[in-house]
Amino acid sequence: MQDIGRSRGGRTSKVHAVVDEHGRPRRFIITGGQVHDCQVLPDLLEGAGAPLAVIADKAYGSRAIRGLIADDGALAVIPSKSNARKPIPHDAGLYKMRNIVERFFCTMKDMRRLATRFEKLSRNFLAMIHIFAIRLWIN
């Protein structure tokens, strides 16, 4: 399985990740580029431990996702989309911590092999991501 999909930009793949408060990865899933982020979140949360809060961007703002997070006993810190009929308030102070995830992906893209996805097979690409994660946990 290659987990390479099609999007407007061509052939792409996405790395979905859960990181802890220190920016260390807890769980990864690789999908094709056309897969929406909210489709992967239940699988991501399943093996990531018991969080106190889940901080995510607007792509995860559906009622189903918020309900799933609440069922796990966590606080959903997800801003509403700008066109939402009933905007749901979120903690702006906690939401600022989302930069930890963005910094994680920026650091991951510093590794050229991951940024350009040299590996054709998904399992090999995931293995390289795990090597990258080990380096982050050691440092």
Image (spheres, rainbow, N blue to C red):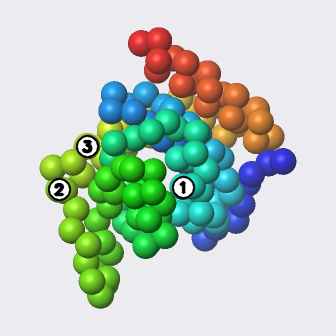
| Cα distance in 3D space between marks 3 and 2 | 9 Å
Going from N to C along the chain, the mark reached first, 3 or 2, is 2
Mark 2: secondary structure: helix
Q: Residues within 10 Å of mark 2 (few under 14, many from 20)?
A: few
Q: Say which amino acid is labelled 3.
A: Met
Q: Say which amino acid is labelled 1.
A: Leu
Going from N to C along the chain, the mark reached first, 3 or 1, is 1
Could you tell whether 91 is left or right of 45 in the image?
A: left
Could you tell whether 5 is left or right of 53 in the image?
A: right
Could you tell whether 130 is left or right of 95 in the image?
A: right
- Which residue is nearer to you in this view: 105 or 57? 57
| Cα distance in 3D space between marks 3 and 1 | 19 Å
Q: Which residue is mark 3?
A: 97
Residue 85, compared with residue 45, is above or below; it is below
Q: Residues within 10 Å of mark 1 (few under 14, many from 20)?
A: some
User: Image point 32% across, 38% down: which residue?
Assistant: 100
Q: Say which amino acid is labelled 2.
A: Ala
Residue 127, compared with residue 138, is above or below; it is below
Q: Which residue is mark 2?
A: 92
Q: Which residue is mark 1?
A: 41
Q: Position of residue 66 (x, y in %)?
A: 41, 64
Residue 53, compared with residue 10, is above or below; it is above
Going from N to C along the chain, the mark reached first, 2 or 1, is 1
User: Image point 29% across, 87% down: which residue?
Assistant: 85
Q: Position of residue 69 (x, y in %)?
A: 43, 56
* Quarter location, residue 79: bottom left
Image quarter in which the C terminus is found: top left
| Cα distance in 3D space between marks 2 and 1 | 21 Å
Could you tell whether 115 is left or right of 82 in the image?
A: right
